Image (tube, helix red, strand yellow):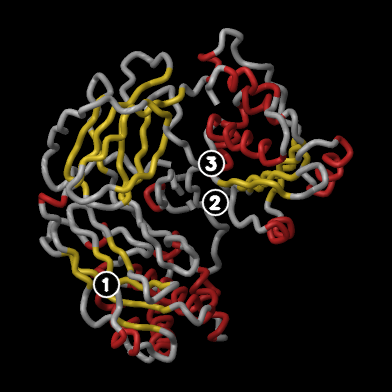
Amino acid sequence: MPSASARWPRILCAAALCGSVVACGEPTPAPTRAPTPAPTPSAAPPTRALAMPAPDTAAPAPPFDLGRLADPDPERRRAALTALPLAEYERVPEGLVRELAAQLADEIGDPLPETLVDAIGATEAIGFQVDLARALDAAAASPEALALAGRVEVLGGARPSSEVVAQMPIHAGGWFATALADPSRPLTLHLQGHAPLSRSFSPTELASKQGSGLVILREPLRLAPLAESEQAGIRGRLELDGPAPAGAAPSLRAYLAPYPINSPSGRYAERARWPDPIAIPVAADGGFSLRGFAPARYHLVARAEGFEAAELDTDLAAGSWLDLGALRLTHSDLSTYLEAGSPAAPPLAWIDTPAAAFAAAAEQGRPLLAYTTASWCLPCQQLKATTFTDPWVRGALAEMVLARVDEDPAFNAAHGASGYPSFLVFDAAGREAYRFSGYQAPVAFLRQLLRAFETLGLPAPAALRPLIEAGRL
């Protein structure tokens, strides 16, 4: 499985996209200039709670058989290349990388894949080949899509091209390959300290599309340093909603997001490492302000010991300050808010056969929660150790029939469950009403359950009503 930093942190990190966002590293590179104090707001902004979306958890895949890349059948070998997991790139022998490069060069009618093996090394080259093969497949599957290959050049020399954030990873030397869902829309690139680049493509460039559906850009896409007048700032205040452990200090991190996305899937691709987040200094009173951000979308993650991590996506405009107001973090122990304390926590009664679970739901007239999992899924182990031991979660789930679906390809295919962990909620008649995925901390999990019950037209679980009445959920 890729490291935490390999997944977009909606944390997006057991972090989105199994679909992740878990925090991607603690290093804190500074913006292009030293922090600048924020101007004093003219009026106090309203207090509000941070939304807490599901983390983007990229579940690890079972071991990949590298022998598939050496299959004598070119079509099977090509299919194996598109299925190669990122974690396996370093294991592919250089000789095999060169053979695959030659096959791709023949497919696109250009020596670029072969040239890059010597230019950037076998491991980086196989990553480019995987991206190129997937882009070609996407273009072949959609008449409107376009496969694109090219190179990024960072002007100013302060940051490497590998830190460029886009819908695709950037390999050594700035090389990339991706597919555009709509060639009339631009490809957007971001880099902290640099002006965003939204690159549109001229009719002449699009006309150069080869028979494979690929356009190779002969000139690099250049990212220029961000002018001081274009820098954006963030200010606000973090509030801890409940007693904090002695010495606990909240932290705030900002992750540059790869949006807008113009890929056929509507998602960004996995990459070996995301740039380190920007640390936003938080004062003793919870106040924060920092200038030096690029005009782009950022994913903010607030943390404090003993509190649920909270996340927020926000767009920053060039040359402006964004006042986030008061951002409140919820205590991890919800019983803190109630004199009565936590509810009774019955053990979770999982049924391991989906058919038996659906039959039980129909017989009992209760909704069903199907939880897809796998023995190798690390976010699933995290759920087991944290969320599924929480008394509030257990109390809420006591009103549902629970199906634990352990690596069941037939169930996953029938219900379109493409990652681990996934949660599918059905009514008593077996009709799906709601779904969510990825690691969910207890409070986030409870909020998902409340949305599911609302979608089903059912009252909130009895165990949660004291929290709802107290305004805590």
Would residue 391 be seen by someone viewing this image from the given angle? yes
The image quadrant of residue 413 is: bottom right
Q: Would you place residue 134 above or below residue 223 in this image? A: below
In the displayed image of the protein, which residue is found farthest to the front?
A: 42
What is the x, y in percent for residue 171?
Answer: 30, 67
Would residue 179 be seen by someone viewing this image from the given angle? no
Q: Would you place residue 241 above or below residue 292 in this image? A: above
Marks 2 and 3, how far apart at CA: 8 Å
**Residue at left 54%, top 77%?**
79
Q: Secondary structure at mark 1?
A: helix
Q: Would you place residue 403 above or below residue 272 in this image? A: above
What is the x, y in percent for residue 44?
Answer: 27, 25
* Residue that numbered label 3 is attached to: 439
What is the x, y in percent for residue 275?
Answer: 29, 51
Q: Earlier in the sequence, mark 2 or mark 3?
A: 2
* Residue that numbered label 2 is attached to: 18
Dot 2 crowding, Cα within 10 Å, few <14, some 14–19, many 20+:
many
Give the camera-side residue of 402 and 468.
468
**Residue at left 19%, top 58%?**
195
Dot 1 crowding, Cα within 10 Å, few <14, some 14–19, many 20+:
some
Q: Earlier in the sequence, mark 1 or mark 2?
A: 2
Q: Does 464 sit left or right of 269 as displayed?
A: right
Q: Secondary structure at mark 3?
A: loop
* Amino acid at the residue labelled 2: Cys
Q: Earlier in the sequence, mark 3 or mark 1?
A: 1
**Residue at left 64%, top 45%?**
423
Q: Which mark is residue 120?
A: 1
* Amino acid at the residue labelled 1: Ile
Dot 3 crowding, Cα within 10 Å, few <14, some 14–19, many 20+:
many
Q: Which mark is residue 249?
A: none
